[in-house]
């Protein structure tokens, strides 16, 4: 009875996760775990949901518990690979992904994830090979087609990329990643209006997604050099992990202060003051920029809601 | 009964006093470390952060580390090993960099929990008045002792993290 209840709750959680309702999905997985706190599959499902919600520390802990409870389940290894890939621990991620791929009843998602990891490791040929294997398992797999389209685009073949992404969107017209890649492909082909439609759709689905911001920035950069630079700077600052951001902030601070001290000691008091003011200006800018960035995003999202064709 | 996720904040009776981690971060620049670090520690407890021990520990480390670096710097000045001018200013910059780095680090850790706290609909207080009061009280706190080590530890401020009083004491300006 309990096993059946847990199974239903996890199925519902997966549906909610696919719909982007992370809170609802988390609640359902928590209910499953309240029934059986030692259910490895429920811990792995919760880790997958937390990963989607960008709660990486929680996802890492949950998948660790799942692996401790059942080290043989290919699904748990796939979730572990996804979490480790998000943490950029690529060698470990690939080791878990390989177990998922070699396990019984392999699913295309394992190959797609493997391709993503191999791509991040710089082995594009192997990534392509894995994606073709995913398409052998499921000819119109949206994830595999989307990733293949992205690879084609980065290899300088936008027409082939456009063909692949068209098939992906025909299979699943609401796929977030497919819309993002479609936006970048349209941008490469010079169709800015269509790229903007895809970007707005992606932002509507997840307004906090850094890749959606990147696409939006790239579109703005085509329209206005100044605005584009502004968006690009914001996206660049928010990219990468916390350590990189901290190093960037502290490096900037120390360099600016050393420049102020050195110019002052050289008797260039005016320049020293100017450098100090420039640093203060940059501090103020980085303080207010996220606020302005969010405001511009909400305006873009308002436009989606008001668009009669949406 | 529900399952508690490891990164989920626990219930706290001080939830109504939680502020965005960016506010104590801002207060180190405007008011000083005397306000920012205890505020970070309080915020971690009020939020019920699962990493509150680490956050409080980092706040204590910030005070102790700054004190140790400041004491070393002043000892070097007294011994005549650290000449006034650029070398002294660069040494002071190292102390300031330590203070800011640890503050940013605490803010980043707290931001992760705050993201989850907000996700579960936790209340967030506007702290504009507290920051203003801290800015007004800054001179009073700095004036509590004329020991330069006290100023090195408790100050923050836009002026490279150190007050003009300290610069004057060291004879740099």
Image (cartoon, rainbow, N blue to C red):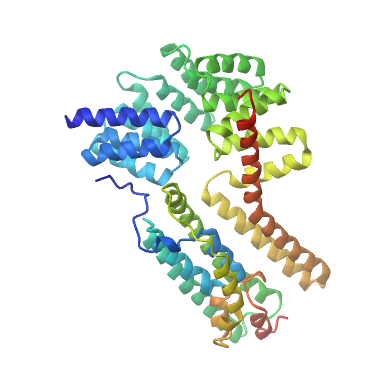
Q: Is residue A72 left or right of residue A79?
A: left
| Residue at 77% from the left image edge and 71% from the top image edge | A264
Residue A106 is drawn in which quadrant? top left
Q: Position of residue A31 (x, y in %)?
A: 28, 39
| Residue at 65% from the left image edge and 62% from the top image edge | A254
Q: Position of residue A195 (x, y in %)?
A: 66, 26
Identify which residue, A26 or A63, lies in the foreground: A26
Identify which residue, A200 or B65, lies in the foreground: A200
Quadrant position of the C terminus of chain A in the picture? top right
Quadrant position of the N terminus of chain A in the picture? top left
Residue B136 is drawn in which quadrant? bottom right
| Residue at 35% from the left image edge and 60% from the top image edge | B12
Q: Position of residue B124 (x, y in %)?
A: 48, 57
Q: Is residue B141 left or right of residue A282?
A: left
Can residue A140 be spotted in the picture?
yes
Q: Position of residue B27 (x, y in %)?
A: 57, 67
Q: Is residue B96 above or below residue B111?
A: below
């Amino acid at each position: 009875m309990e096993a059946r209840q847990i199974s239903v709750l996890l199925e519902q959680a997966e549906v909610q996760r696919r719909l982007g309702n992370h809170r609802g999905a988390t609640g359902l997985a928590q209910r499953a775990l309240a029934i059986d706190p030692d259910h490895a599959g429920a811990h792995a499902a919760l880790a997958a949901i937390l990963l989607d919600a960008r709660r990486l520390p929680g996802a890492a802990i949950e998948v660790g518990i799942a692996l401790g409870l059942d080290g043989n389940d290919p699904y748990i290894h796939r979730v572990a690979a996804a979490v480790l890939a998000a943490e950029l621990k690529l060698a470990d991620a690939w080791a878990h992904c390989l177990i998922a791929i070699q396990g019984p009843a392999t699913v295309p998602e394992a190959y797609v994830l493997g391709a993503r990891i191999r791509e991040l490791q710089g082995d594009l040929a192997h990534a392509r090979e894995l994606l073709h294997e995913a398409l052998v398992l499921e000819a119109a797999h949206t994830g595999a087609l989307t990733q293949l389209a992205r690879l084609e685009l980065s290899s300088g073949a936008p027409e082939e990329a456009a063909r692949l992404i068209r098939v992906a969107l025909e299979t699943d017209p609401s796929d977030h990643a497919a819309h993002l890649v479609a936006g970048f492909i349209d941008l490469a082909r010079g169709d800015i209006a269509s790229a903007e439609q895809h970007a707005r759709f992606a932002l509507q689905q997840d307004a906090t997604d850094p890749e959606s911001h990147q696409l939006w920035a790239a579109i703005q950069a085509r329209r206005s050099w100044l605005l584009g630079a502004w968006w690009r700077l914001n996206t660049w600052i928010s990219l990468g992990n916390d350590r990189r951001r901290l190093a960037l902030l502290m490096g900037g601070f120390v360099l600016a202060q050393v420049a102020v001290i050195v110019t002052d000691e050289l008797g260039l008091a005016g320049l020293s003051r100017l450098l100090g003011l420039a640093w203060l200006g940059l501090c103020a800018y980085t303080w207010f920029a996220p606020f302005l960035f969010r405001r511009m995003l909400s305006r873009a999202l308002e436009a989606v809601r008001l668009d009669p064709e949406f | 009964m529900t399952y508690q996720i490891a990164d989920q904040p626990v219930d706290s009776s001080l939830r109504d006093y939680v502020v965005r981690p960016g506010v104590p971060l801002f207060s180190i620049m405007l008011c000083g470390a005397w306000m920012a670090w205890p505020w970070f520690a309080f915020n971690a407890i009020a939020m019920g952060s699962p990493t509150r021990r680490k956050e409080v520990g980092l706040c204590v480390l910030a005070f102790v580390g700054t004190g140790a670096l400041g004491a070393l710097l002043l000892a070097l000045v007294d011994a005549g090993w650290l000449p006034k001018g650029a070398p002294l200013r660069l040494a002071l910059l190292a102390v300031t960099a330590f203070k800011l780095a640890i503050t940013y680090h605490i803010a980043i850790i707290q931001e992760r929990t705050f993201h989850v706290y907000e996700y579960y609909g936790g209340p967030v207080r506007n702290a504009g008045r507290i920051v203003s009061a801290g800015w007004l009280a800054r001179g009073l706190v700095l004036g509590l002792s004329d020991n330069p080590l006290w100023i090195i530890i408790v100050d923050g401020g836009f002026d490279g993290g150190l007050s003009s009083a300290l610069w004057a004491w060291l004879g740099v300006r």
